[in-house]
Image (cartoon, rainbow, N blue to C red):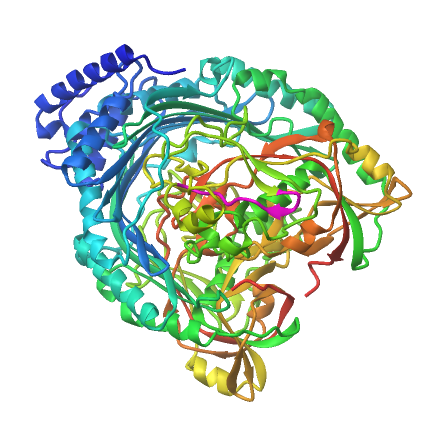
Amino acid sequence: MRYARREFLKATAAAAAALALDRASSHAQVLVRTATMPGDAPDLTGLALHAVDAAQRAGASYADVRVTHTRTRRLSPRIGRQVEFDETEDFGLGVRALAGGAFGFASTPYLIRDEVERVAREAVSLAKATVAMIDRPVELCEAPAPGHASWQAPIAIDPFEVSLDELADWMSGYAVYAAELDASLGWKLELQRQRKVFASSGGALLDQRFQSTEGDLSVEYRNIERQSAVLAATARGWEYVQAAPVADEIAARIAEIDDYLRLPVMPLAPGRFDVIFDAQSVGALLSCTLANATDLDRAMGSDVDSDGGSYLNNPPSMLGMEQVGAELLTITADRSHEGGLATAGWDDEGVASRPFTLVRHGVLSAFQLNRESALWLAPWFKAHGGVAQSNGCAAAPSALVAPMSHVPNLAVQPATQGPSLDAMIAGMDDGLLVTGLQSRQVLMDDQCFSGMAVPKIVLRIKRGRRVGKLEGAGMLFRSPQLWKALTVLGGPQSMQWLPGAPSSKGMPPQSTRYSVGAVPARFRDIAVIDPRQR
Amino acid sequence: MARRSSRPVSLFAELPRFLSRAECADIGQRVLDLAQGGGETAVRIVSQWTGEIAWARNAPSTAADRRDNLVSVQRAHGSALAVASTNQTDPDSLAAAVRAAERDLRHSRHPLTSPQRLADPAVSHRYPATQIWSDATMAQTAAARGADANALIAPARRAGLLSAGRLSARARGTALVDSRGRNLYARETAAECSITVVNSNGAGAGWAGATCRDTCQLDVAELAATAVRKCESSRSPVAVEPGRYTVVFEPQAVYALAWQLVSALNRGLAEFGSGPFADRVSSRYGVGMARLGQRVVDPRLSITQDPADPMLGIVPFSDEATDAEPYQQVEWVDGGVLAALADDRSYALANLHRNLGTPNASAFRMSGGSSGVDEMVRSTERGLLVSRLHALFTLDERTLLTTGLTSGGFWLIENGRITKAVKNMRFTDSPLFAFNSVEMLGTPVSVYADPEQFLPAWAVAAELTMPPIRPAIVPPMKVRDFSFTGLADAI
């Protein structure tokens, strides 16, 4: 959906009128004119355009502006039919200005004309203050001008239009259901929507509306807790919650715990094993290894003081050459994937979302780029007959922080004729099965190179059957060796989309979300240890 | 309800960089006036300005000026509780937040909430005077930060190395206003610097960092020199076998271990039978007992919290609970003996017959000795020198068994001398074991006090753009039999 020119002009004219009113108010009103009530919402597009204009007037050779309005509602069910609520509503405007070849950034929560002027001037002033320190000016690669356009996450039912009674009843109903099965639920429901307006001196004016819905659900039964992905975070509306088979999931987790308790505990003998990871676990491994290692900021050492580096630390010579996994491993990135947490019409530099391949048949085929970092690879692009282009990975969780390169939605491509998880287990003569591994249980070094996984559920498989459980087992690995040890990938029917580990960058950290699509996979000769052994 | 006129919150011609005492009080009063339907109301406000410059590969990446607020409205009625927050300060937004909290309140029945959840007016808290403000930090200009950043980058550039880091000045106001008459405010500043220098082949790194209230106390030349020196002495690191080593920990590494221990000082957890300070279940009372009065670490070690200490100053009231309890001077560990555990007022009322909790600010001083790091190295026949630990993960809450990585400089000590740079390693050990195996202690110093620095990425929430300031003072330490369990090739 794109703005008609007439609608755009009407919007900006209204903005100008509103701003004129603001200007008429006295300075003494500055803290009290940031309306958030329905029907009196601040004009985000008008303010964004005004900020761009102000930055250019202050001397910026390029400026981009983000304005965000974010609303979050969190619900936590308590005992019986009790529910606790927490609501947040935030506004922000941030200006990034390029002046004299250096970047400056300034932001404010106050969406008023005078403050927007100040912020724009401040960003330019900050840029100019650092010009003397730069050896060579910052440049941004060319990007097709998106013009004036809008995008909206495709949702059927706006969760914020659902009554609190329905929300509370929905949550507490399942708590009562679980109690009838002698289980208890630990969960939170988080609904978030964000409107983000982006404007740039390149002529872009983008109006995007995002939605995320997440149910963090765990089932506790017979003193064992199991996390559930039935309401894993997604960019969908209330229809996603309504359609989720929560009751079936609670029953399934209880049955799983029963099965787990029936299995004998087997001694943990460190050694090397073939290991099957379920789809969620493969997603966690991807999140903690290649998802971060292929961020060009990290690979070039830009984040070494805050987030760390990458073992893929010589990008020009590694691109298209470095074997980072087995031949059957292909990883795609796509910020246009429907329902993905990183899905957008454009990134936070106005670059249109498009899919690209990060790893093709085990070979590194791309890094995550923004408009600045793409030019670091300009010689490589030229040598390969192309020009440096951003692949749309710039993101900022709110307008109050400067955009950085963040992980897009990723997917491990399934094997066309690949097996299901059950078929994979049936085909294993002797090995281990890991299920439900979470990214927080994968401990990586600063280079995303060597790591240790400490899953909660590790089962022993013999002749295709689960015969016991290992308690407290850990797996040591190095990222390239792990992915090269991949021997079997699940088929398309086994694909699951789940949230990736939050993409956290900078100091203080700014965190964005993305989705990971993954299939179960089998790896050979994984080192299994007792991580509690001192 | 008497509705206030829409007079301005601020009379300043220009918006302040963060909210003052008068502005917070005015916002708080507006919210109290807006509340309808009885019950209790509390408003918590955090307002922050950050001026910063970040650089990478010897060039500035961004100079920034960021401002934000958090106005959190809590409404309680009987046992019901609801919270709504905004970063806006205008009357309409405040009214919207109050209405949202009250709307949610009608659907909320918090079973754990007692009427005492909000502050008891009968309790007159006394808050310690703290020294947490610096005019110099507040007045630091972007040009001055740029000059400091230049001074941080130049030595690395001259040495043919690559520098990355961040230098910031922060000013922040924290307030609590409630319907029981409490009206608290504190303002604070922080100057922070973190610098990592790497060599061009990425095989060695040196780190340095500092946190203080007054930017004038940041010795940027010293920080740059330290990071460069550590990087240069980290060239061509060799791998050593995992195993148990005598280890000399620099203060920043001790901080990581000590922070793990201080974070676990929780009385409720201990008496529930969890965590490292749970002892046993009392047959008489049927409840768990904490290890209070027992020796838990080396008798030379004491851990204290003292908001009045000029080097440990913090906002004097707890920002977690609406009780706004004062942070007190507490001896958590006295001569190796567990002397106190943290609790909040509701726990203290219910279980300890006390009307005041003991909140843990995670700002602490660990006692030390008189040995220097050089002396510790000279006295070591074979061991390792560790600059920093990060990416910590607790494997066992009961023993506080923790795994993590070395970083920022790691060397082999042989016959009293540093002989080689060593590739980083994964350790698996407990702060409790380490602090019971102390051989030597040095003079405690202020460290780069940023707990987020050694948390794994998944633990970092999106809302951490305004992290609280928690200073710490710890000594360097020589420890025997510290366990390294694997190699980490990363720098």
Residue B266: x and y in percent read: 52, 51
**Residue A366 within the magenta-colored segment of the rendering:** yes
Image quarter where the N terminus of chain A lies is top left
Q: Is residue A225 above or below residue B289?
A: above
Q: B308 left or right of B4?
A: right
Q: Is residue A91 above or below residue B240?
A: above
Q: Is residue A91 above or below residue B407?
A: above
Residue B177: x and y in percent read: 28, 35
Q: How many marks?
A: 0
Q: Residue furthest bottom?
A: B415
Image quarter where the C terminus of chain A lies is bottom right
**Residue A507 within the magenta-colored segment of the rendering:** no
Residue A18: x and y in percent read: 17, 18
Residue A451: x and y in percent read: 62, 55
Q: A280 left or right of A336?
A: right
Quarter of the figure with residue A53: top left
Closer to us: A60 or A277: A60
Q: Residue at x 67, y 42 (%)?
A: A329
Range covered by the magenta-colored residues: A360-370
Q: A500 left or right of B67?
A: right
Q: Is residue B97 visible?
A: yes
Q: B147 left or right of A526?
A: left
Q: Residue at x 23, y 27 (%)?
A: A49
Secondary structure character of the magenta stretch overall: loop
Closer to us: A72 or B118: A72
